[in-house]
Amino acid sequence: MHRGKGSFVLRLVLGSLLLAVVWQVAAIAAPQGTLSFSWPEEFRAIDPHRHDNQRVFWAIIGKNVFDHLVERDALSNIVPGLATSWEAVTPTMWEFTLRQGVKFHNGEAFNAAVVKYTFDRMVRLTAPCLFLFDQIDRVEVVGDYAIRIYTKAPYGALLYSLTMAEMVPPVAGEQDSYATKPIGTGPFKVDQWVKDDRLVLVANEQYWGGAPKLAQAIHYPLMEAATRAAALKTGKIDIAHQLPAEEVGAIRATAGLQVVPVASNDTICLVFDHDKAWGDPRVREAAARAIDVSEIEKYILGEVGVAAKSAMAPSVFGFLDCSSEFPKYDLEEARELVKAAGYPNGFKTNIVAPAGFYPKDREICEYLKAQFAQIGIDLEIKLLVPASAWPILDSRDFELFIAGWGAATMDGDFALWRNYHSSSTREGFADPLLDQMLEIGRASGSQLMRQAVYGVAQVEIIQNVLRLPLYNPTRIYGISGRVQGFTPRGDENYDLRAVSVTGS
Amino acid sequence: MLSYVLRRLVVVGIGLLIVSFGIFYGIRRSPIDPANTMIPGGANAEEKARIHAALGLDRPILVQYGRFLHGAFTRFDFGTSYYSHEPVTRLVLQRVPVSLSLVLPAFLLVLCVGIPTGFLAAIRRNSLLDYSVVGAVYVIQSFADFWIAIVLILVFVVRIPIFPAFGRAGPTSFVLPALSLAIPLFGRVTRFVRAGLLDVLQHDYIRTARSKGASASRVYVKHAFRNVLVPLVTDTSMQFVWTIGNAIVIEEIFAWPGIGRLTINAIRLGDFPTAQLCVLFFAVMFMVVNLAVDISYTFLDPRIHYA
């Protein structure tokens, strides 16, 4: 009896200790803390089928409020998402096995019918993002957790496109409130969206991949760079997306803040109209030889960009470093080429740029003007507001244009096809080898084969100077020391799953 | 008076119809195309056709306008935003109070500083005070409001952390935006009051009042200043309406979701329904304030009355 009483007390003490430990662990494991961040852009819509392809949508809402059938890791490789395995059964039919036990934020279950509903809704609402999926013919349900996707032609880039298709719940997706409070399966839920003021996300503790560490994430759209920098310095926000070069020094000097420049996946190019003088490859090569990219990088771009190494950015799948293929800087040679092309006295030309759309566009145009003058080309600079500049790209009312193209799906097909395949380019050229490489790259289901052909394609583009890639803009992140686990990505997505904050 | 007001309201209605058609037609004829903003890098012909069909932009303009009017008159429905799919009436009604809560305090500040300053400068004409006021006004009026805003942020947010960098939480968040808006504007009121008073003070009835032995305050306030009120109210009211839209720069800097920002972004992105209602809102504001000011004349100046 004496032993019984003692062991009871012992059990009571051990039990309380265990309870205390479990309570503490649970408290630590429960989502806590609020992360505030700011992009210089407000969402125009937050419904996945109504947003007009804004990067900020995919970066914040697409990545955290929703899941996709497959996802991209930080190196742009495909990893499972809501689909656990997949197979290209025929060149035009892929079969996906779906993850079980996944629920939407409102309790609806995720299954094969949801996938079909999502793609149907996209078509029904004429979603602006449809152009990413125009190779998909139809989606078939073949079981509760199995679907087949049929494509119009063999489409190896399907997986990359699918990383951009947010899965929408069939019941909630039909309600009007969905446009201002969308529901997905992701680690965060939309709590509140006050346009031009803030977007508040709260943790989804029932997330199938494990609850996130943060309790809340708030996005403030602050257009003005000075405001964003001031908010970061005074601690009102923890992450400032895209700081201008002028603020970098002050932020670096502030204790508790760090500056992280990351190359984006945009490539800004000098675009030629091949129906004019620029159609002659010698003239284009002359232009390339008149431009010293290292000078541009050092003196004009500074922290704001890095010289382009290829027709697409290094973080995109299929990238090949073509630095050695660019025509070398040689003004003498450039002059000779211009004369050989039939312009002994040079010629006049113009360049159009959407003012302010790309960093340092004015400076680069002025650099081009000075350099071209040395090889006999008289360049007239036309800086127009973007709304007036884009129609000129359509109407071909230009000789040269400064235009960029990002890779929303982080895949070579998206990065290259639209601007370089003869069926879709608006610049008036047709390169049969390039067309062939792009077609194989689009169709082939083997990522190895695609990597190879995109390599050939990039070399072809650079050697023939079909467009002249100039630089990849960098995104300069200002990050507070209280943020843990945040890694800026090449696709600019904010993966908030593993992010936590110290302090409150 | 009542019949005058009613007649004016009829004119306002006709004016609004003309403005609404003007903006409806104008924005559709302009090079701004929502399809180009929706597809990054510009839309090709096929995508444009698809988006235009979905938004109803492929119909003839008169048909589109007819449907717009029908919705407006029967359901007070001015359409839904092409982007956020919210009814634009709700969008605009949310944003107007935000802008007003910025512009009203700013204008109160402008009047409280501008009127006494102009007053003092006028009655102490050619004194040191007068010269310094006029000089200061010329200098300060040349400052841009966004420059003032950024300087205020650098000093009173970063250097000496008193005010928040952005947002609308709490009374401290009103100070910097209202100041940035007010500082470039009060100069106009000062100069107006000063010039108006200087002119009025030349008149015979002032000399009469003074020779009657009226006290200084009676002469200056009751006799002189009252005659400056009518033009001052006219000018200030129009400035007020103009500033509601012009506050867009301050709204951008301090991240206030106001109507100026909504308008500019709607036009820039080709969100036609929102842009239309915003422009209509400014037209309404302008006409209604005009009418209110005209009516106020009957109280300010007993010589004015309407049949």
Image (spheres, helix red, strand yellow):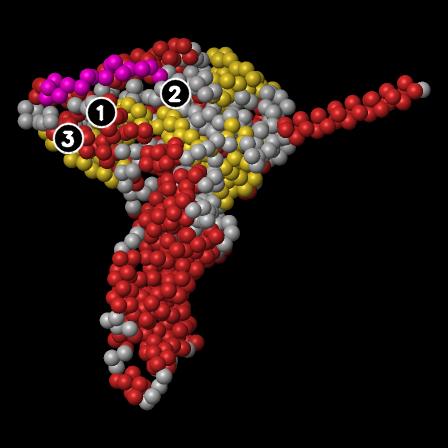
Bounds of the magenta span? Answer: A319-335
- Give how far across and how far down residue A434 sits, in percent: 28, 16
The quadrant in which the C terminus of chain A is found is top right
Amino acid type at image mark 1? Glu
Judge by depth and name the residue closer to the eye, A375 or A415.
Answer: A375
Q: Which residue bears the numbered disc 2? A: A315
Q: CA distance from mark 1 to mark 2?
A: 23 Å
The amino acid at mark 3 is: Ala
Does the magenta-highlighted stretch encompass residue A334?
Answer: yes
Q: Which residue is mark 1?
A: A295
Would residue A482 appear left or right of B239 to someone viewing this image?
right
Chain letter, disc 3 residue: A
The furthest residue to the right = A1
Whichever of callouts 3 and 1 sits on the residue coming sooner in the sequence is 1
Quarter of the image where the N terminus of chain A is located: top right
Is residue A341 rendered to the left or right of residue A305? left
